[in-house]
């Protein structure tokens, strides 16, 4: 007879609708664990959208997760939903003081970090002629400065052989109008994955970039300009629709697990083929 299936957290399913199975017990009493069983993961910007989906998938695969978010109420809601293996630390990734507080909380666990996902990003945009220094700094401080110093400050806590996932975007390799600063900032994030992998080679720490395309996460409609824009974007995607956060989380799991053991300094694009064909 087959093994006994242990259900994942309630409501968690794969993008294809199948249940996520994290633990099975064979008829001989042997247990097959999830891909991140026993790992400690840190996910910035993890209170909603893609970050929350990544945290949920990591928990389903056996990890303990420390996640951050700027809004404490939203962060508390995410922690309550994701369960007891998740710890929330309020903070803004563009603030060095908040990053220090995050690392203090991680250090207090007494465990090395096996997986770091620098997901926090975003920022307000404006057309080239209307961009102000304050708007420019807001985007670059979060996406470039925040990502860089998230990794730098985590270095003493990362296990040798840890996996670092930097969430970039296909915007980093295109020229969408009125998003010059955002596009350039995401190109910088992708570049970090190359250089950081080389910088950390003696510790066998792999750094990769994850570049989502259009994904129906919180704020996506406002970012692209409303429902009509969403319809046009969906028509431009070869698979014919906007992506789901859970699909990006599945790709993040690949980069965070040993399944990607020979992948380093690379960019994994998750965009339904939009930027590839």
Image (cartoon, helix red, strand yellow):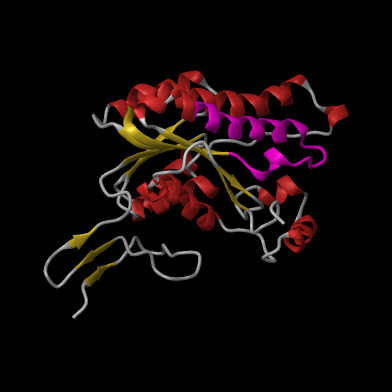
Total marks in image:
0
Q: Is residue 270 above or below residue 92?
A: below
State the residue in front, 266 or 41.
266
Q: Quadrant of residue 169?
A: top right
Q: Residue at x 81, y 27 (%)?
A: 131
Q: Main secondary structure of the magenta part?
A: helix
- Residue 153 in the magenta stretch? The answer is no
Q: Residue at x 38, y 47 (%)?
A: 257
State the residue in front, 267 or 34.
267
Q: Position of residue 40 (x, y in %)?
A: 31, 39
174 vs 242, left or right, is: right
Q: Is residue 125 above or below residue 98?
A: below
Q: Residue at x 50, y 69 (%)?
A: 16
State the residue in front, 156 or 78.
156
Check the picture and name the quadrant holding the N terminus: bottom left
Q: Quadrant of residue 179?
A: top right
Magenta stretch in the rendered image: 168-196
State the residue in front, 157 or 141.
157
Q: Is residue 171 above or below residue 26?
A: above
- Residue 189 in the magenta stretch? The answer is yes
Q: Residue furthest bottom?
A: 1
Q: Position of residue 254 (x, y in %)?
A: 44, 51
Q: Residue at x 30, y 55 (%)?
A: 34
Check the picture and name the quadrant holding the C terminus: bottom right
């Amino acid at each position: 007879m087959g093994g006994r299936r242990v259900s994942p957290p309630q409501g968690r399913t794969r993008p294809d609708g199948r249940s996520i199975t994290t633990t099975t017990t064979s008829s001989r009493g042997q247990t097959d664990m999830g891909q991140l069983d026993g790992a400690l993961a840190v996910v910035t910007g993890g209170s909603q959208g893609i970050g929350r989906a990544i945290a949920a998938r990591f928990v389903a695969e056996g990890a303990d997760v420390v996640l951050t978010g700027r809004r404490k109420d939203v962060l508390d809601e995410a922690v309550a939903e994701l369960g007891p293996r998740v710890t929330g630390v309020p903070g803004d990734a563009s603030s060095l003081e908040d990053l220090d507080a995050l690392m203090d909380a991680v250090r207090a666990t007494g465990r090395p970090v096996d997986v770091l996902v620098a997901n926090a990003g975003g920022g307000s945009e404006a057309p080239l002629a209307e961009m102000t220094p304050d708007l420019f700094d807001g985007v670059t401080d979060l996406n470039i400065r925040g990502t860089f110093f998230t990794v730098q400050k985590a270095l003493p806590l990362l296990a040798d052989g840890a996996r670092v996932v930097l969430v970039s975007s296909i915007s980093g390799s295109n020229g969408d109008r009125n998003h010059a600063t955002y596009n350039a900032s995401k190109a910088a994030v992708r570049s970090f994955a190359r250089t950081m992998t080389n910088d950390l080679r003696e510790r066998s720490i792999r750094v990769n970039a994850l570049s989502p395309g259009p994904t129906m996460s919180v704020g996506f409609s406002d970012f692209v300009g409303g429902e009509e824009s969403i319809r046009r974007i969906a028509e431009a995607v070869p698979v014919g629709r906007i992506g789901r956060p859970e699909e990006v989380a599945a790709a993040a799991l690949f980069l965070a697990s040993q399944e990607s053991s020979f992948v380093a300094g690379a960019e994994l694009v998750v965009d339904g083929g939009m930027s590839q064909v």
